[in-house]
Amino acid sequence: MQIKFLGTGGAFEPTYGNSAAIIEFQGKNLLLDAGFTVYPKLVELNLWQQLDYILLTHLHNDHCGSLANILLHCVFHGQGKRPVILYQTEDFKQQIVDFLNFQLKDATLYTEFKPFTELTGLIYLDTYGRHSIEFQTYSFILEENGKRLVYSGDLGDSKFLFDYLGTLPELATTVYHDVSFNPENKGHAFYTALRPYQNKYPIFGYHCDPTQQPADNTIPLVYQQPGLCYSY
């Protein structure tokens, strides 16, 4: 189980790319999120052909803005191959369908939808309203070969995620969590809120501008970790 980030920035840090990653999991390649910078990055690195599944944490533009482009590219340049979108709930599936139908008219011509249960060891945590008021978001948890990988999505309430992790069986766990250096940004975890959990879990921060981190930040950033992200 390996993760590599296509981008580590937020909606307003295009220099670092929208936060998204590819995870090798159970012999498959999972694309986590598809913001507006993700499609050109996939094409540039010729990674689009390797995608087996697409997972979305939520439907903000910096997490799904190039989804339609990715699907179209795969169909027209990949001999009709339709990437599979794994959906968390029927309600969220319908949100994705409605979003895509505005652009593709009929999303089912370009993608296949399958439930999260398609892959064992893949868990979602419903974080509704914990990033944006009355807005659906999710965190992802992947377990394979005695290891656990946690991907927060966009989550202002980090305690909610770590409380949930505390209810799970002990496994070697690495957490990739969105981080903010602005205390007024309530939609993402302020960096000091993650400190109490560093004694238990390795935590890496993403969805930020690394040049803005304060001198007392103790959360290592994905952008600065060799091998964790494609060059941007």
Image (cartoon, rainbow, N blue to C red):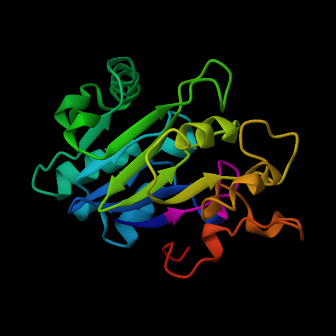
Instruction: Indicate the quadrant containing the N terminus: top left, top right, bottom left or bottom right.
Output: bottom left
Q: Can residue 168 be seen in this view?
A: yes
Is residue 125 rendered to the left or right of residue 195? left
Residue at 37% in and 43% down: 55
In this orientation, which residue lies closer to the viewer: 68 or 212?
212
Question: Where is residue 130, by image quadrant?
Answer: top right
Q: Residue furthest front?
A: 170
Q: Residue furthest bottom?
A: 226
The overriding secondary structure of the stretch rendered in magenta is loop
Was residue 185 drawn as part of the magenta stretch in this picture? no
Is residue 43 rendered to the left or right of residue 65? left
In this orientation, which residue lies closer to the viewer: 25 or 159?
159
229 is higher (above) or lower (below) than 75: below
25 is higher (above) or lower (below) than 154: below
Residue at 44% in and 57% down: 171
38 is higher (above) or lower (below) than 88: below
Instruction: Indicate the quadrant containing the C terminus: top left, top right, bottom left or bottom right.
Output: bottom right
In this orientation, which residue lies closer to the viewer: 101 or 160?
160
218 is higher (above) or lower (below) than 149: below
Residue at 33% in and 50% down: 70
Residue 185, image x and y in percent?
81, 40
User: How many numbered marks, from 0 up?
Assistant: 0
Residue 144, image x and y in percent?
31, 58
Was residue 11 drawn as part of the magenta stretch in this picture? yes
Q: Residue furthest left?
A: 79
Q: Is residue 68 visible?
A: no
Residue 208, image x and y in percent?
70, 57
In this orientation, which residue lies closer to the viewer: 152 or 162?
162
- What's drawn in magenta, residue-wise? 6-15
Residue at 55% in and 37% down: 164
